[in-house]
Amino acid sequence: MSELFKDIPEFVETNIGESVTARTETLATFRELGPPDLCQVIKSSGSKTAQKDLGSYHYCSGVEASSSASLAAYLNSLQFSVEEDTAWFGKGHGWKVRSGTYCCFNAFSRVDMRVDVKIPGGVDAYVVDLRGDKHAATPELWQETYLSALLRAIRYADDASYRLAGYRKLDPITTPEAEARFLKAAEALFFKGWQLGSDPEIQVATVVTNHLTSAVLKYFQDSFRLDRAANLFERMMVNEPEVAALVARSYIGMNEEIKAVKTMHSALSSNPQSYPILHAQCDFLLSKGKPEWAQQIAQQAVNSAPSEFVTWAKLTETYIELGQFDQALLTLNSCPMFTFNERDLHRMPTPLKTHLPVKKFIAESGILDEESARDNEADVALIRLPAPGLRGTFAKAYSLLTLLVSKIGWDELLKTRSQVFVMEEEYRLHKTSASVEMNGFAADEDASTTGVRGGSSAGEREPNTPSDIPTIRISTESTRTPNGTTFQHQKKESQSQPMDTVLEKPEMAQVNDEPNSPIGMKADDASEEGEDDDGEEGNGTNQPPSAFANKRLCERWLDNLFLVLYEDLRVYTIWRAEISHFKTQHMSYRKTGTEWEILGELASRLHHKEEAKDAFQRCLDSKFSAKALIKLLEMYATEGDLQRTLNAAIRLTTYHHRWYMDAAYPSMIAHYLFKLGLIHGHAKIQYTLLSMNLPVGIFEIMQGYMKYGATFNVEGSEF
């Protein structure tokens, strides 16, 4: 239709201006960097018989928000993207952009900077606060808005949780002059960075740990140019010694380890309680194979910041490297957990129409097989795996748990768990014996009641245990379906082999369900309470009291993570057993593309890299998958496989441009291409691209990455 944009996504409004109104109403809900920029336009037709004005909007990032003029220029550029209306002869009455509003969130002052443009006409810039009131725009607010827009473009460039339809991503920094302006703004607002928030694993944002410092590190680290970041952080370190942690990390990334060590030594001499500096030193020691030294540093960081999750997680990591797995479990159990807050996104009314056009050269290239979406069916047991739903501190804790099980195995992990935590049956026996000693025969009924109440893992938790998830059996020739699907849904009464015979189901640890048992209470404290109640040593059972008194209570969230891990290992074990069975029988093992994608992610979570690689490759044989391509791109680049890395990069680039992610950098594709440049050199990459006979549009996109490297002199690229 002639009233729509040719290559730009848009959502047609039911009522003109409703998108801007909805954004105003949700301003108070934005907590950190804020949502993507909103661009709303009103189009009108020159024909008197045509319909009335039409309002539409789309999201975008990367547009320079340093002044009202730059935002007005973007709105003006949209009028050249409207499809032309052709008549039988001559020029028809086409639609034109009559006016527009650009909204950009200022994450520092928590206001929305807006620019209204009338074509032809004037430009009106103003500020909307959280209450919806208008104020005048000042140079200070423009500087904050400019940096906020850049930080969103950098931080959320490849963030899977920040993807939404109709989101157009442009290059935020295109010239060395623009990069210098970015560094200047970052320096001016550096000590306000804590106001922006931080990663979900950080409870309290500081001058060192916030979205501003993370964005600067990401931008320059991914392009192997950390010297620029080091220069900025060195200037900031004069006023804030704790910034030495960022300076040290930059030096290490530049292979200037001696400078990094000197910087950390000097900073710790004056500020020995700074956990970011201690963590920088800890990571350096781990990279050098000195986990025993790193453990001492990590312990000091915990003492300095006991309320932060990252300090306990780092200490857990050092214990795992040392092979002290019981201490690793106890430390992981002590981690303070935080609620994960979703990214700031819009809440928009349902649009009248959605327009998501495909660029002509992408449609003609044939690289994207969007028809393969029909291969999206998957077994419910795979879809219902709980691990992919973990976020924030829980996802990080789970990664540590999977690292632990990859080191010692499932059986040894359960054994270690029972040695350090009070188990459900053990706790029930202890409480029962205490009641018997105190009340004799009359206490039997109370003990049974207490057992049900205190051991709620078996009672209250039954609906959430893995037994509700359909049992999976190892496929045989007689159970194979015509399409080759091997995962079967089975009830408990079926004749299939139960998973418990393959993988031991974890016994529930005793969790703090007792009314007088606070969270985090030690088991020996509970034991002492039992001893005070009956006036004995609590040795009414055959088990010595010391076996119970030296253990801890397992936190509920960690108990649940064990169940999550059990589900992952159960499905993984069955999958590998099926493959072995089919190989023995010389039969073809088939899955849908979506099932291979899920299995690849499963193997990746459990640190089985080769199995994950194989599953992702099989996934791409069945359908197009951006998730599989991202994982394979990382694997191939790490291995230095030039041809496969370029193939994955080309397909992923085409996918990104299909969904309007037009930015060359920052992106993981550019990062891995630069990494290839360090390994093979620019000439070989260029020759390989020329030999692949790519469509013109795709080749130009790949050349865009080369041009970026040439513009900014990326190390090792020779661009």
Image (cartoon, grey):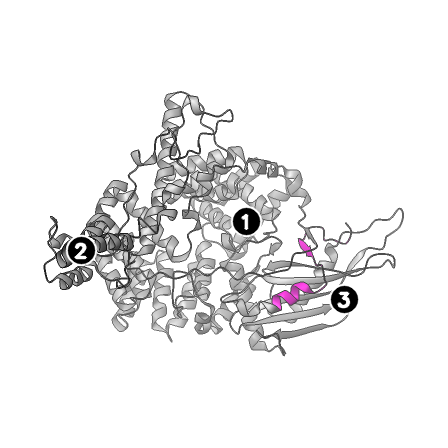
Which image quarter: residue 50?
A: bottom right
Secondary structure of residue under mark 3: loop
Up/down of 451 relative to 140, above or below: above
User: Badge 1 is on which residue?
Assistant: 706
Number of callouts in the render?
3
User: Badge 3 is on which residue?
Assistant: 119
Q: Quick one: label 1 or label 3, which is nearer the N terminus?
A: 3
Between marks 1 and 3 in the image, the one whose residue lies nearer the viewer: 3
User: Badge 2 is on which residue?
Assistant: 442
Secondary structure of residue under mark 1: helix
Query: Is residue 282 left or right of 71 when viewed as pictured?
Result: left
Amino acid tagged 2: Ala
Q: Residue at x 65, y 66 (%)?
A: 20
**Marks 1 and 3, Cα distance to the nearest angstrom?**
37 Å
Residue 549 visible at all? no
Residue 247 placed where, x, y %? Answer: 37, 65
Magenta run includes residue 90 = no
Residue in the foreground of this view, choosing between 205 and 482:
482
Residue 178 placed where, x, y %? Answer: 56, 64
Q: Which residues are magenta?
A: 2-24
Q: Residue at x 40, y 70 (%)?
A: 207
Q: Residue at x 40, y 47 (%)?
A: 387
